[in-house]
């Protein structure tokens, strides 16, 4: 008897919020609900930082951001002050799940998993992720798969174009198109290639949160009551659920399935202007303050008088200007740890705009990662557990903002994603998982299929 095809299916849903699936809308999501009722499910703690890059690579490799040397979408390329580089797939130097399965003889298909651009050889098929610049560059393995995709889907999307925009109707259509294309492609490759393992990631969930959370959520500070997009996120979750059902119908009745999100989502309450705070406290000095808000790399910093600076994003990154480490370092190395701890305490004490305490979490990479490679931030800041983002622009003197400095954005990320696992051969009857982390996925799946894991993985084996 031939093996089930695929033996293992992973449906990645970037940013899907567990509270919406497990509680608020569960009755509207019949396919996900059936998987939960038959298998195991629970909240799953993300990586720190809880962002797409590096979270998916952490999940699929069992390594943390420090081990990977990937601390965000952009990372300091060296110790100079302005050189930030996008962390694409070439930054991942360790094998991921599909590589390990391929080495064990499984045929694999990895579709749009963040961290796979540019594409590279696997034992099967790979379609690169949203970091792919365009379809004019190689984006598949084998290369000929791109021509087949163009035949199947002439308007194949790599991501939702310009999703930080006020063109809401166009964005919504693009989100649905992106989702349908990923699931359609998965169905076609299952039918054509019958891979032992298939994984897809839909980025539409993330994009719809960032574009349409305000109309949905009355607790959002910029809630839009009566918006025609009030049900956009709910309706999209229902659509994704239907596509999950369609895909499962194409699989063998013995196929094991994992539905997983790399992190969750929450309303964006505002932004902490981290560099303006550093200016206020004498850590950052500009030679000439700009007349309008500008990114820090577009203004002239007096590095000889600067002790620290920050980067904007869903979380805060603080870099310190250390003697002998940075070109114009001013903090003596002997005083570095004391200065870092003092700055961490200062950032932790940032209050809400009305002066109330804010539960900020300020972390040192050496205390949260197994190893620290590359050019890591000196401090990692979660402002109110990511309810507030970090804003890096300078120029208007404001310590807080209600807007994202990179374009319209309704939501921030949340530290917990979700996982739902069901293997028809070993049903669990709705077991609720406690204490699961993103790092547990790789060792758990390798153990399930009798494969030797790489040494020193961070995660544990879950009882799924």
Image (spheres, grey):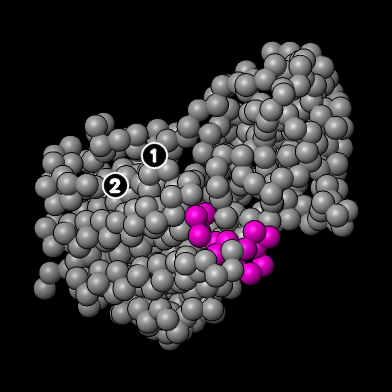
- Which of the pair 379/429 is nearer the observer? 379
Residue 215 magenta: yes
Q: Which mark is residue 157?
A: 2
Image-quadrant location for residue 336: top right
Write the residue at 62% across / 18% down: 80
- Which of the pair 143/150 is nearer the observer? 150
Q: Label 1, on which residue?
A: 131
- Which region of the structure is painted magenta? 209-223
378 over 182 or under it: above or below: above
429 over 337 or under it: above or below: below
Mark nearer the N terminus (1 vs 2)? 1
Image-quadrant location for residue 135: top left
Labelled pair 1, 2 in contact (Cβ < 8 Å): no
- Which of the pair 280/19 is nearer the observer? 280
Residue 165: tell me if it is visible: yes
Q: Quadrant of the C terminus?
A: bottom left
Write the residue at 72% across / 24% down: 291
Circle 1 Cα neighbour tier, 10 Å, few/some/many (<14 / 14–19 / ≥20): many
Q: Quadrant of the N terminus?
A: bottom left
Q: Is residue 411 left or right of residue 112?
A: right
Task: Give percent across and percent down for residue 161.
Answer: 38, 44
> Considering the numbered disc 2 on the image, is that residue within a helix, a strand or a loop?
loop
> Considering the numbered disc 1 on the image, is that residue within a helix, a strand or a loop?
loop
Circle 2 Cα neighbour tier, 10 Å, few/some/many (<14 / 14–19 / ≥20): some
148 over 5 or under it: above or below: above
- Which of the pair 410/248 is nearer the observer? 410
Task: Give percent across and percent down for residue 158.
Answer: 32, 45
Distance from Cα at disc 1 to Cα at disc 2: 12 Å
Residue 285 magenta: no
Q: Is residue 190 left or right of residue 169?
A: left
């Amino acid at each position: 008897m031939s093996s089930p095809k695929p033996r293992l299916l992973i449906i990645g849903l970037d940013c899907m919020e567990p509270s919406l699936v497990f509680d608020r809308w569960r009755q509207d999501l019949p396919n996900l609900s059936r998987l939960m009722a038959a298998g195991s499910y629970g909240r799953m703690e993300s990586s720190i930082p809880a962002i797409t890059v590096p979270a998916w690579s952490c999940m699929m490799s069992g390594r943390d951001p420090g081990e990977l040397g990937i601390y965000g979408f952009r990372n300091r390329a060296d110790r100079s002050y302005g050189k930030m580089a996008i962390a694409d797939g070439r930054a991942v130097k360790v094998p991921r799940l599909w590589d390990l399965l391929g080495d064990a003889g499984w045929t694999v298909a990895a579709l749009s998993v963040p961290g796979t651009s540019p594409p590279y050889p696997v034992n099967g098929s790979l379609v690169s992720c949203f970091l792919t610049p365009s379809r004019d560059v190689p984006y598949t393995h084998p290369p000929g798969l791109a021509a087949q995709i163009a035949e199947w889907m002439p308007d194949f999307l790599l991501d939702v174009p310009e999703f930080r925009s006020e063109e809401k109707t166009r964005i919504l259509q693009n989100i649905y198109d992106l989702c349908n294309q990923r699931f359609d492609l998965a169905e076609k490759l299952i039918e054509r290639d019958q891979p032992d393992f298939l994984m897809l990631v839909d980025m539409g969930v993330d994009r719809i949160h960032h574009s349409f959370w305000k109309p949905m959520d009355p607790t959002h500070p910029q809630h839009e009551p009566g918006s025609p997009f009030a049900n956009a996120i709910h309706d999209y979750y229902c659509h994704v659920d239907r596509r999950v059902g369609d895909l499962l119908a194409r699989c063998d009745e013995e196929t094991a399935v994992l539905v997983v999100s790399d992190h969750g989502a929450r309303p964006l309450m505002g932004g902490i202007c981290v560099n303006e705070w550093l200016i206020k406290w004498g850590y950052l000095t500009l030679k000439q303050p700009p007349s309008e808000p500008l990114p820090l790399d577009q203004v002239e910093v007096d590095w000889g008088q600067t002790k620290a600076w920050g980067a904007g994003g869903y979380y805060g990154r603080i870099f310190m200007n250390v003697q002998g480490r940075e070109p114009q370092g001013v903090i003596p190395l002997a005083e570095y740890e004391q200065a870092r701890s003092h700055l961490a305490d200062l950032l932790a004490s940032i209050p809400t705009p009305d002066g109330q305490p804010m539960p900020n979490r300020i972390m040192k990479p050496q205390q949260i990662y197994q190893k620290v490679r590359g050019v890591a931030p000196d401090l990692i800041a979660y402002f109110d557990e990511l309810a507030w983002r970090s804003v890096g622009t300078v120029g208007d003197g404001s310590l807080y903002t209600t807007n994202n400095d990179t374009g319209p954005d309704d939501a921030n990320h949340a530290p917990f994603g979700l996982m739902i696992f069901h293997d028809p051969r070993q049903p669990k009857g709705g077991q609720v998982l406690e204490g699961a982390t993103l790092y547990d996925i790789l060792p758990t799946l390798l153990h399930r299929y009798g494969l030797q894991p790489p040494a020193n993985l961070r995660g544990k084996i879950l009882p799924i």
